[in-house]
Amino acid sequence: MSETELVASPHKSRRFFQRSQEAMPSLPEVHASIAVPTTGVWFRRLFAFMGPGYMVSVGYMDPGNWATDLAGGAQFGYTLLFVIMLSNLMAILLQALSARLGIATGHDLAQACRAYYPKPVAYALWVACELAIIACDLAEVIGTAIALQLLFGIPLIGGVLLTALDAFLVLLLMNKGFRYLEAFVIALLIIIFGCFAVQIFVAAPAPGTILHSMFMPSSEIVTNPAMLYVAIGIIGATVMPHNLYLHSSIVQTRAYERTDKGKRDAIKWATVDSTIALMLALFVNASILIVAAVAFHGTPHQDVAEIGDAYQLLSPLLGLGIASTLFAVALLASGLNSTVTATLAGQIVMEGFLRLRLPHWARRLLTRGLAIIPVVFVTILYGEKGTAELLVFSQVILSMQLPFAVVPLVSFVSDRKKMGSLAIPRAVSVLAWFVAGLILMLNFKLLYDTIVGFG
């Protein structure tokens, strides 16, 4: 039987992908490795499922977000807070759908695409996803290198080369167990959250203005090409394509009951986990933009877009000597954290689409090498300003890859022939397709403006 054939099963929530003999569970080394209690208070069950959502949230506050949020706040004040809120709501929906796919079918999104689509389509989707991972890696490389330079005076190129060593950090954590990996991620998230909580307290923005900008969109977001460019970058930096592949895999590390009832319960707790975690990401992203708006918008420093310049100016402008250091520490934590999720996403995508299994360190060094080469090239030719522009551009590239992950995901989870009783309700399906359509529309608008010379 071909691997693309569907399985006719009497089970209500039948699997629609035929596993061939060579097929293996997603992330087989940690598959169903974390126990889930079947009795006890609800908090014990929630705690058992907590972890994947926080690992996914890392991608929503990585160094790429810093560049776009910083540029948005400095240039346009609080206006783009609505875009951050909108993209976060999109992320909550899409990550919930991703978790549902993984739990309901036992396959991650990459495996689903390989099994269900014709090979040429699957390979095209694989290439698009690899481009997204490389773009994400670009952001991590640049962000981590800048943080090392700001904190320790390491030259930018030296910091870029040092980032290749993080492959061994991930290998060490994976060997200890998936819970150790999750604990590492959550610890760094706490550091990032704490750093920005202090900066927001010192910046003391007007709550009324922030709420108005967050919930009342301005038409200028679409009509102003410069603002739209940054807005698309924010969406690309927030709704991460490879996170959809990642989440559909790592939710399967829980040893929930593989029955309809057990899967429904797992979907519920996985959705709660990711929703709470992504609200943390919303706080961080909004904080970066708000701090930039308070410190730079309407001042001679309004055109600040480089993270290094923001670091130099934050302490004097906010009147807090430690503000710049907190900014750099949070950036370093963000860069380190992002290496974990990008490593896993790369492994999941390569194994799911190609069934090509490489050692973790080899896979990480491969993708990191692809990211390091353009950063070194741009740094040598254009200096730090060039890397800042590359950072923002990488997020626009991410946004362009979104439809190639979003459309297959929504298509799968909406189809009752494939998902059985665990397919999403029609109302949720309509909303999900609307989100996919909005992403496509914004991307086409950006492409049009770029082609006619206004991007």
Image (cartoon, rainbow, N blue to C red):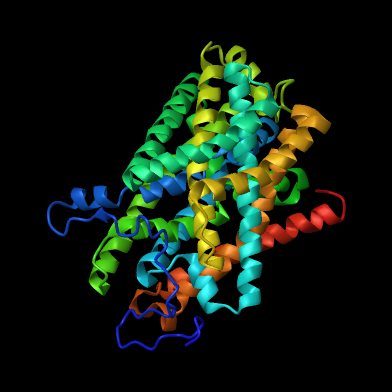
Residue at 52% from the left image edge and 78% from the top image edge: 116
What x and y, as percent, mark residue 125? Answer: 62, 67
- In the foreground, 373 or 294: 373
Residue 416, percent across and down? Answer: 42, 81
> Quick one: 365 or 141, which is closer to the camera?
365
Q: Is residue 270 left or right of residue 111?
A: left
Furthest toward the right, the residue is: 453
* Relative to 364, 178 lies left or right: left
Residue nearest the viewer, comparing 308 with 347: 347
Could you say which quadrant of the image residue 393 lies in? Answer: top right
Above/below status of 272 relative to 205: below
* Residue appearing at x 84%, y 49% in the figure: 454
Q: Residue 84: horizontal and vertical position, in percent? A: 56, 45
Q: Which residue lies at the image location 34% right of the left edge and 59% below the top edge? A: 31
Which quarter of the picture shows residue 312? Answer: top right
Q: How many marks?
A: 0
385 left or right, relative to 154: right
Any part of residue 28 in sight: yes
The reply to whether residue 293 is in sight is no
**Location of residue 408 by image quarter:** bottom right
Position of residue 27 relative to residue 63, above or below, is: below
Give the percent coordinates (x, y) of residue 265: 26, 64
Q: Is residue 35 above or below residue 123?
A: above
